[in-house]
Image (cartoon, helix red, strand yellow):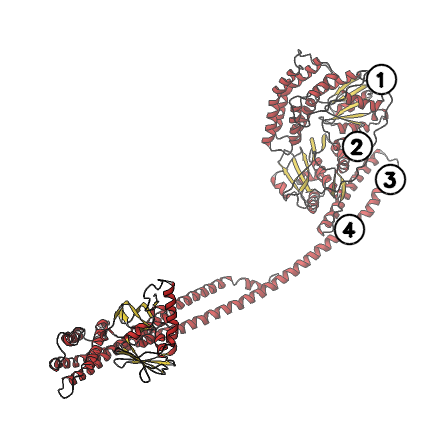
Amino acid sequence: MATAEDRRALARHPQDRLRYSWLALTGFVLVLVLLAVALVQARQATLLRQVVQAGDDYVVLMVYQAETEQLRLRDQWQRAADDRVPLDADTLRLRYEIWVSRIELLRSADLQHLLSDPDGDQRTLQQAMDFIQRADLALGRTPEVPLDRGFVSALLPQLESLTAPMHELSLGASHKVSEQLEARGIAVRQQNRLGLGLTAFLSVLTLAFAFIALRQVAQLRERRLVLEELATKLRLAQREAEAASDAKSAFLANMSHEIRTPFHGLMGMLSLLRETGLTPRQVDYLRTATESADHLLALLNDILDMSQLESGRVTLAVAPVDLRALLRDVEALMRPQANAKPLALHIDAAPGVPERLLADATRVKQILFNLLSNAIKFTDHGAVVLDVRTREGEDGQACIEFTVTDTGVGMDEATQAQLFNRFVQGDSTRSRRHGGTGLGLEISRNLARLMGGDVSVRSRPGEGSCFTFHMHLQVPPPTVSEPAAPLPAVLPTSRPLQVLVAEDHPVNRQYMAALLENLGHQAHFTGNGQEAVEALCRRRYDVVLMDLHMPVLDGVGATRAIRALPDAARSTVPIVALTADAFAETRDRCLVAGMNDFLTKPVSVQKLAASLRRLFGSGTATPNDTPLPPEPSPAWAGSHPVVDESAVAMALQAMSRERLAAMVKAFLDQAPETVQRLRAAVRDAQPLDLRTNAHAAKGAALNLGMSALAATAEALHEGAAHLPAHEIARLVQRYEDLVPATRQAMSALDVLRAEPQPAVTE
Amino acid sequence: MRIRRSHPNHPGTGRRSLLCLGGGLLLAAAWPVRALVAASGPVVLTVGGRVRMPNQGDAAHFDMTMLAALPQTSFSTRTPWYAQPRRFTGPLLRDVLVAAGAQGDVIRLTALNDYRVDMPYQDAQRHDVIVARLLDDKPMAVRDKGPLFVIYPFDSRPELRGAVYYSRSAWQLRKIDVL
């Protein structure tokens, strides 16, 4: 782009530096010369002041006047000595006084530097003083002798002898002053010449300086013109490049759009083809064709999104969104993918997350789909968790944060750094295995930024990844909420029920067994969702009590599997969720998955009975014929006493004191092991293990009324993914510390007084 | 430089009593209209030229007593004629001129040795020029540049310390002509 001329313009720098140093040097000399001129002028001013002040000429005048007065006094004195004229004493005295004043003046004035012959002149003055001393005898303030002609005549020769020396003095001073004036004149002339020379030099320098400065300015202007020209060219080039890029994007967007239309037709035909009675081999081909088509469609969608984001044509359709419904949709789409692998999928909303918010639901879902499907794609076993919580953003505004944590392969730093770049995937070998365009994360990040948030990642190889998407939280004004979906029809039965309890925690199993026994039902247990599905296939149960958090297959997954069973009688079995989460979101998720009811732990005998009554009618057996006392409200949600007495009382309604004691003891005896497991999870940085263990401990502790332990386990469960490690360690420590206190509190309530019973068999 | 003015009736403090002050003010206000009396002692200063209140022919003659009767001004100042600052005392030149009823454009000063210099009439109005009769509170003999010495308050303004004003400071003053 740069022409030869441009290059020359840019290559002038060394010369410029030289010129600048010349400029600086000239400036420096200029300053020096200015200083010299100032010095010369100051000296001239001093000289002039000397001329004005010293008054040497004035001294010459003084000497001259003294000589004049000397002559006048001499004349008067001669007249006074003359016998022919009368003696004019007053005039003589006046003349004498005036002369004395002149001599005094000469004596007091600084004559030294003016006198050509200081010794001789001093002698002259001394001569005058001698005369005054003698004359004062008659002419002074206090005359000692009368002023008469004799006195005057006697002193006349002495006075006359003063005439010549006084003249000498006057002449000498005059000559001396002339010399001095001459010398000073020469000095002034010299100074003047020097000043003129300096001024001339100064003028030359100033002209040179101005010349260089002007040249500099001219060159700068020239260079600026060159640079401006260059900038214009670059701008034009950039504009052209942008236009070309825009055209490509537009073309891509158009083409993607155009391709999709016939493509949908192709896919429709493929699906119709499936219904036309194909051989297994053809079905297999068809499946491959459909998968390829799906992949192609996903690619097209990504490209369309990307080109639209690039050309700034994406606008957000912000509207009030029901967050639960949104998460439900996300889960509905993601769960089959997760279930295709041995993967647990948890979606948790923290308390305090508003149910409704202002957002572009489609785009938020798109980001969550992308993050979740990535997590599922790159995780072969373990779990994928989506946590939703609110927090305060960096700018002080409220944020909603979606965190997708997986137990997958993880990434190193270099991969993370490239992750959000176009067409970059975790690693190229894996991309072949997992497919995808590589545009997903870039699209997600661009969308998140459009929403005032971002997508970020935290990961280590082999330790899973954690993607965080946050956006500004805007809450719409409250509206009337929609009525909850009606529960399924009640089955009118009044017999003892065969109950399948899917629950992984032994203490909880014992507890449920006690409750069901108390209600007159028969309990059967499985340890996880998978086993529950298998058990249902083996025999019929009236109802399934399903814990939500279980290893291998969780409650929601098991429910979906059951609902998907081919046998209608088995797939419609009523399912009741058991969970320690009291959130509406969890409840909705359960109901969406196909569950019929939802019980929060601690499960009281009343709650269980009421739920079964809803499902099987009022004829269902109750523990007593008399109505039950009102259920004590659980107190653990507020402050956390070590033991919640009301919960213990509730448990005692369901089972004997001995049985409860045995369960409490079993739980507390198991506590060290639990703590060990929690610690191991912390040590190995396995937040999911930590969650699972904490959750199991929480449920059991709640059922047995150990509210402090339950609260601590709850905090661990909640904080497993985001609390700092030391905080988690502190919670585990607290859990451990609470065990003896709980044991003591249970003893105080007489629960542990009884001898431990043998463990209840399942 | 400190210039102190005092009326001869109340030398020094001038704060003895309200009555005295009142009397001084009365006198000060009264004397310009008072006709100039004839000199009784030896004449030390003759004011001639445009004089409206002569007491001897066309001129106003002053003896030392008459000059001492005018309000006195004292100040110390450095001069080119003495190594140390000296204290001069005497009536203001403008008061002397008022006493003689003299008014004009130029004041011509003449000394005993016939030294003569002209000063603008305005100098007497603008500056506190005095006709000094005391040097360090003592009368001045002719040999001490007396008996009268025209002195500018040199130290009150820098521009007064120059050859022009030094030349206007006539000593051994004997005559003032207002032209």
Instruction: Tell me where residue A263 appears, x and y as whole percent.
Output: 81, 45
Answer left or right for A158 relative to A567. Answer: left
Work out whether mark 4 precedes mark 3 in sequence or the reverse, and give the earlier one. Answer: 4
Work out whether mark 2 precedes mark 4 in sequence or the reverse, and give the earlier one. Answer: 4
Q: Secondary structure at mark 2?
A: helix
Identify which amino acid the numbered label 4 is placed on. Answer: Met
Work out whether mark 1 precedes mark 3 in sequence or the reverse, and give the earlier one. Answer: 3
Quadrant of the rendered image containing residue A104: bottom left
Q: Disc 2 designates what residue?
A: A592
- A209 above or below A587? below
Callout 2 and callout 4 share a chain:
yes
- Examine the rendering and report whether any part of residue A683 can be seen: no
Identify which amino acid the numbered label 2 is placed on. Answer: Val
Label 4 neighbour load within 10 Å: few <14, some 14-19, many 20+: some
* Gap in angstroms between the C-alphas marked 2 and 4: 39 Å
Identify which amino acid the numbered label 1 is placed on. Answer: Arg
* Gap in angstroms between the C-alphas marked 1 and 3: 49 Å
Label 1 neighbour load within 10 Å: few <14, some 14-19, many 20+: few
Callout 4 and callout 1 share a chain:
yes
* Gap in angstroms between the C-alphas marked 1 and 2: 29 Å
* Gap in angstroms between the C-alphas marked 3 and 2: 29 Å
Work out whether mark 3 precedes mark 2 in sequence or the reverse, and give the earlier one. Answer: 3
Badge 2: chain ID: A
Observer-side mark, 2 or 4, equals 2
Q: Disc 4 designates what residue?
A: A255
Q: Image point 14% across, 79% down: which residue? A: A147
Near-viewer residue (A298 or B29) = B29
Specify the quadrant that holds the N terminus of chain A: bottom right
Badge 4: chain ID: A
Q: Which mark is residue A272?
A: 3
Work out whether mark 1 precedes mark 2 in sequence or the reverse, and give the earlier one. Answer: 1
Identify which amino acid the numbered label 3 is placed on. Answer: Leu
